[in-house]
Image (cartoon, helix red, strand yellow):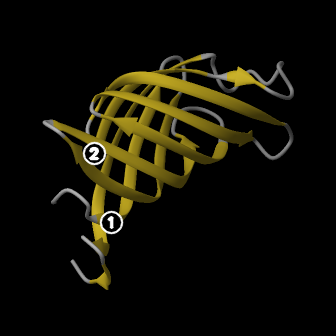
């Protein structure tokens, strides 16, 4: 992985606090270098799938920046088919270009009484490169 390269990546994550969710999706990630500092930027689409008790799905879009410190923003639509709730989750923690461990706070935008998602969240996410989509100015090269 070199500075300036961009990848389409498979996203695997685990989110927990009072509830446990497996997360699967696709991400666009890149690493840039500014002076001695490496900075990662990632945006993604995924789905959180509750792995304890009741089935709850959470289609999600988000982004994060990382240079040792990881900062992210997410919008998630949680549903158990009968009820649903839109949540906004800012997060902060440790992050690199393809990895993060963060604390997030779920802010209910709709249906604040939806109890199958907690307010607090610890998230761990790893990206696995599927295809290089830009190589320092060139495009669509396989990994």
Q: Please tell me in which quadrant of the rendered image residue 135 appears.
A: bottom left
Query: Contact (CB < 8 A) between labels 1 and 2?
Result: no
Give the total number of marks visible in the rendering: 2
Please tell me which residue is depicted at 74% across the width and 21% down the height of the picture: 115
Q: Quadrant of the C terminus?
A: bottom left
Residue sitting at the far front: 35
N-terminal of the two: label 1 or label 2? 1
At horizontal 56% and vertical 34% (from top left) the residue drawn is 73
Q: Quadrant of the N terminus?
A: bottom left
The image shows residue 95, relative to residue 92, as above or below, that is: below
Local SS, label 2: loop
Within 10 Å of disc 2 (Cα), the crowding (few <14, some 14-19, many 20+) is many
Counting from the top left corner in percent of width and height, residue 13 is at: 40, 43
Q: Which residue is mark 2?
A: 97
In this view of the protein, which residue sits in the foreground, 136 or 45?
A: 136
Which structural element holds mark 1? Answer: strand
For disc 1, the neighbor class at 10 Å (few under 14, some 14 to 19, many from 20) is many
> On residue 7, which mark appears?
1
Q: What residue lies at 63% left-to-right and 19% top-to-bottom?
A: 118
């Amino acid at each position: 992985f070199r500075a300036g390269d961009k990848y389409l990546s498979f996203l695997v994550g685990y989110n927990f606090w009072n509830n446990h969710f497996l997360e699967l999706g696709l991400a666009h990630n890149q690493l840039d270098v500014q002076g001695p500092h490496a900075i990662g930027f990632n945006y993604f689409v995924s789905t959180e799938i509750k792995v304890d008790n009741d089935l709850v799905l959470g289609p999600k879009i988000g982004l994060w920046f990382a240079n040792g410190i990881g900062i992210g923003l997410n919008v998630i639509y949680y549903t158990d088919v009968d009820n649903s709730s839109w949540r906004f989750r800012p997060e902060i923690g440790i992050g690199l270009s393809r990895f993060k461990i963060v604390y997030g706070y779920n802010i209910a935008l709709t249906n604040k009484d939806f109890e199958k998602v907690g307010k607090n969240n610890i998230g761990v996410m790893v990206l696995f490169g599927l295809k290089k989509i830009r190589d320092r100015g060139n495009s669509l090269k396989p990994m």
